[in-house]
Image: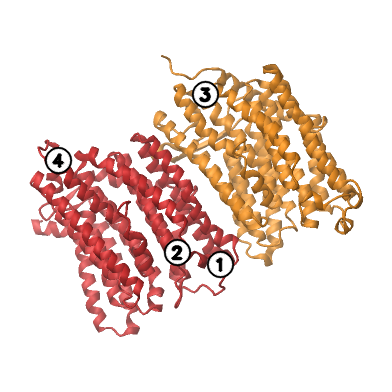
Amino acid sequence: MNALQSDLFSALPELWVLSMAMVILLLDLFLKPQQRILIYLASQLTLLGAGVLTIVTHVPTVGYAFNAMFVDDTLSDVIKVMMYIGTSLILVYSRQYLQLRGMFRGEFYALVLFSLAGMMVMASGQHFLTLYIGLELLSLSLYALVALDRDNVRATEAAMKYFVLGALASGMLLYGMSMLYGATGSLHISEVSSRLMNGGDHHAVMVLGLVFVVAGMAFKLGAVPFQMWIPDVYEGAPTVVTLLIGSVTKLAAFAFVIRLLIQGLAVLAVDWQNMLVIMAVLSIAIGNITAIVQTNLKRMLAYSTISHIGFLLFGFMSVSGNGLASAFFYIASYTIMSLAAFGVILLLSRQGFEADTLDDLKGLNQRSPWYAFLMMITMFSMAGIPPTLGFYAKFTVLQAALQAGYLWVVVFAVLMAAIGAYYYLRIVKLMYFDEPQDHSPIVAPFGMKAALSVNALSLLVLGLLPQILMSICAYAIVQSL
Amino acid sequence: MFESHILSFAIWVPILAGILVLFTGGDQHAGKARWLALIGSIVAFAVTVPLYTGFDFADGGFQFQEGFQWIPAFNINYHLGVDGIAVPLILLTSFTTIIVVIAGWEVIEKRVAQYNAAFLIMSGLMIGVFSALDAILYYVFWEAMLIPMFLVIGIWGGPNRVYATIKFFLYTLLGSLLMLVAFIYLYHQTNSFEIVDYYRMPIALDVQILIFLAFFMAFAVKIPMWPVHTWLPDAHVEAPTGGSVVLAAIALKLGGYSFLRFAMPIAPDAAHYLTGFMVTLSLIAIVYIALVALVQQDMKKLIAYSSISHMGFVTLGFFLFNPLGMEGAVVQMISHGFISTAMFLCVGVLYDRMHSRQIADYGGVANTMPTFAAFAVLFGMANAGLPGTSGFVGEFMVILASLQVNFWYAFLAATTLIFGAAYTLWMVKRVFFGEIANAHVAELKDLNRREFLILGVLTVLVIGFGVYPQPITEMTHASVSQLLSHLAQSKLPAL
C-alpha cells in the first residue's frame, strides 16, 4: 500500500460521508417533492455505509494519515460509530416534523451530513488545523440548520446570535492556537506535546494561548461563563436541529477536548485543570439553578445541558485512564438521554404545534402511559437516579473527581444535583399528577415510535447492565492514549 | 436453584409481578390487576418464608449469600446476604405488601394496575435494600425505591400531594447523595464496594466522623430523626392509605436498619464519639415530638408524629451499645411496623367513609361501628405501649437498657408511656366515644369482611408478639452480639 492509499484507507468513512452529502444535494435537484423520501433513505444508507466502513477499516493500532494530521484510532472509531447511531436516530425522529413544516428538503439532510463529516474530522484531528477545519465545518452547517426555517423570527435570531458568538469563539480558539504555535513551533498535536514535555522556555506565552484555547472550547461545549448562546439557540432553533446540537455534537466536543487538552497539552494540566474546576462548578450551579425557573421545555433542557457539561468536566480533572473513561461514559450516556428527551418533544409536536412548553406534557400518563413512562425514565436518568444509566454516569465522574482529590467540589456538586432533581421531578409531576390539557391523539410513524422506545428503554437496560457501555468507553480510551 | 437464590427470588418475584400487573392495562381491567397483584404479593411472601425456616439461629454472620460480578470496572458485585437483623424486616416487608394490596382493593378506583404495580415493585426494592451486601447495589435499591413512592404519593395522594411528594423525594435524595460520596471515598481506600471490607478497614477518627455524618444525613432523614423529620407528616397526610402504611411500616425501618449495617460498624469510633449527640436527638424526638403529636387535629398527622416519636426509641436503643437496647430497638421496629400499619388502616377505614381525617369531624363512632371501635381501641392501646401488646416489649427493653446507662435517659424515655397514652387515647376518645357527633357519623356502616380480615390478622400479630416476642429476639440475638463486639473494637489506625 502506498502512502496515498493508506491515507485514503484511514479517512474512508469521512470521504464517504462527504461525497454522499454532495450526491444528496445533487439528487435533490432531480427529485419531485413526493419522491423526497429517497433522500431520507439515501441519508440513512450513508450512515449505515459509514458504520460498515468504520468497522471494517478498524484496526486496534493507531494509524496516522495525511502527514500525521489525521489519526485513526479506536477512540475515533468508537466515537464515530456512536455519532452514526445518534444521527440515524435524529433522522428517524425528525422526518415527520420536517414534513409537517415544509422543511422536508434535501438541504436539511445534506447539512446534517456535512456537520457529521465535521464532527468526524474533529474526532480524528491530530493537528490544530485539522481540528479547526472539522469544527468550522460543523459550526457553519449548524448555523445554516438553525436558520433553516427562514421565515421564523425566533430561529433567524437564534442563528444570528449563534453565528456571531460562534465566530468570536472560533477566533479565540485560533488566536490561542497561534500562540501555542509561536511557543512550540508546531501545529502537530504530538509535536506540541513532545516539545512541551522537553520543557518550554515560553511558559507565559503557552499559558496565555491555553487560556484562549480553553475559552474557545468552553464556548463550543457550553460551559459557564461561555454558555450564553445555549438557551437562546436551543429554544429558537427548530426542535430537530436542537436535537442535533444537544446530542451528537457533544460527542464531537468531547473528542475535541481529548485531542487538544489531553493529547496535546497534558503537560499544562496543572494550568487548565484549575480553569476546568471553576467552569465545572459554575456550570453545575448556574445550569441547575436557572433551569428551575424555566417554563419552556427546550430552554430547560438547555440549562440542564449546561449542568451536564459541568459534570462532564469532572472527568477531566484527573488526567488518568479512569477519569477520561468516566468522561467518555458520561458524554455517551448524556447523548442517549438527550436523544430520548428531544425525541419525546418531537413525538408530541404536530402540525402547527411545537409541544415545547412544560405545560404541553401535562397529563401525558393519561394520554399515553407508555410514552409518559419513557419520558419518566429519561428524566430520572438525567437527574441521576438509579437504576437508570444517568446514575452510573454521575457515579463514574464523581468517583474520578474524588480520586483526583476534589472532595469538597464533589460535595458541592451532589448538593447541586439534588437541586437539579427538582426540575426533572417537575416534569414527572406534570405527566403523572396533572390532568391533560389537550387530548389529541399522538400520531407518529411506527419507525419513530419503535426507535424512541428502544432509545429510552436502553437507559433502563444499560442502567441494569452498565458494564456494556462502560467497558466500550474504557477500552477506547485505553487503546488510544 | 431455589435454595441458593432465595434472596434473589425475594427481590425479583415482586418486581416481576409488578411489571406483569402493569401490563394488564387500563382501568377496564382493574379486577384482573387486583387479583394478579394479590397472587403476586402472596407468592412474594411465600418465597421469603424459607428465610425464617432455613435460618441458622446460632450464626450471627451473613446467611443465604449469593452473588456474581456485576460491574467489574469498579469491582461492584451483585452480592446478597442477610443476618438476623435483616430477616425479620424482610418478612415484615413482604407481609405488609399483601396487606397493602388488600387494603386498596375497592378504595383505589383510578389507575389500579399502576397502583398495585408500584407497591409490588417497591416491595422488591426494599427487600433489596435489606439484603444488599455491596454498597452500590444497596444504593441502587435505596434510591430506586424513591421512584414508586414518589408516584404513589403524587398520583393517589390528597390535595397537597405534589408539595408533599417532591419534599419527600428531595429530602431523601439530598441525604443519600452524601452517602454516595462516602461510599466512593471508601471505595478509593479499599478498592472495593463490599460492605464487609469496610468493616475491617481502619479509619482515622476525623475521617470516621465525616463518614458517619454523611451516613447520618441519609439515614436520619429516612428514619426520620428530629430535626429533619418535617417531610414525614406532610408525606403521610397526603399519601393514600397504602402509601402511609409502607412509609411507616417499612420505609422508616430502612433508615434504622442502615444505621446498624453501615454507619455504626463502618465508623464505630465516630459512633461512640457522637453518642451524646445521637442520644440527645433521639430523646428530643421521643419527648418533644410526642408533645407535638398531642396537639394535632388531623389523625394521620398525629400518627405520623407518633411514628417519629417511636422511631426515637429505635435510635436510642442503638446508641446505648448494649444487647438489651439494640434487641429492643429491633423488636420496636417490627412491632411499630404492625401497629402503624394497623393505625393507618383504621384511619383509612374512616376516611373511605367520611372523606375526612379531622378529629373534630368525628365523635361517637363506637355507637355505629362497634366492631371497628374494638379494633381501634386495641391498636390505640398497642400504640401507647400497653403491656401484652407488641408495642410494650420494644419500648420496655429500651427503657430498661437506658436505665443501665443513665437514669435520666430512662426517665425521659419513659415519659413516652405517659405522653403516648395521652395523645393516642385522647384521639380514640374524641373519635370513638361520646355522643354521635353528626348525621354523617350516624350513617356509618361497620367493617366489611375485607377490612375485618386485615385488621384481624394484625390483631393476632400485635398480641402474639406482645405475649411471645421470642421469634424476633432469638433471630436477632446472635447478629446483635456480633455487631456489638465489633463496635467495641476501635478501628483507629495504629499509630
Q: Judge whether residue B462 can be spotted in this image.
A: no
* Chain ID at mark 3: B
The residue tagged 4 is A204
Q: Amino acid at mark 4?
A: Ala
* Rendered view: B398 above or below A147: above
Q: Earlier in the sequence, mark 2 or mark 4?
A: 4
Label ID, residue B270: 3
Q: Going 70% across and 20% down the picture, which residue do you hit?
A: B408
The residue carrying pointer 3 sits among few (fewer than 14), some (14 to 19) or many (20 or more) residues within 10 Å by Cα, namely: many
* Chain ID at mark 2: A
Query: Distance of mark 4 from mark 3, alpha carbons?
Result: 48 Å
The colour chain B appears in is orange
Q: Amino acid at mark 3?
A: Ala
- Left or right, residue A371 beside residue A448: right
The residue carrying pointer 2 sits among few (fewer than 14), some (14 to 19) or many (20 or more) residues within 10 Å by Cα, namely: some
The residue tagged 2 is A296
The residue tagged 1 is A368
* Chain ID at mark 1: A
Residue A319: x and y in percent read 27, 39
Q: Earlier in the sequence, mark 1 or mark 2?
A: 2
Query: Distance of mark 1 from mark 4, alpha carbons?
Result: 60 Å
Q: Going 16% across and 56% down the picture, which residue do you hit?
A: A130
User: Closer to the observer: label 1 or label 2?
Assistant: 2
* Rendered view: A18 above or below B213: below
Image quarter hosting the C terminus of chain B: top left
Q: Earlier in the sequence, mark 1 or mark 4?
A: 4
Q: Amino acid at mark 1?
A: Ser
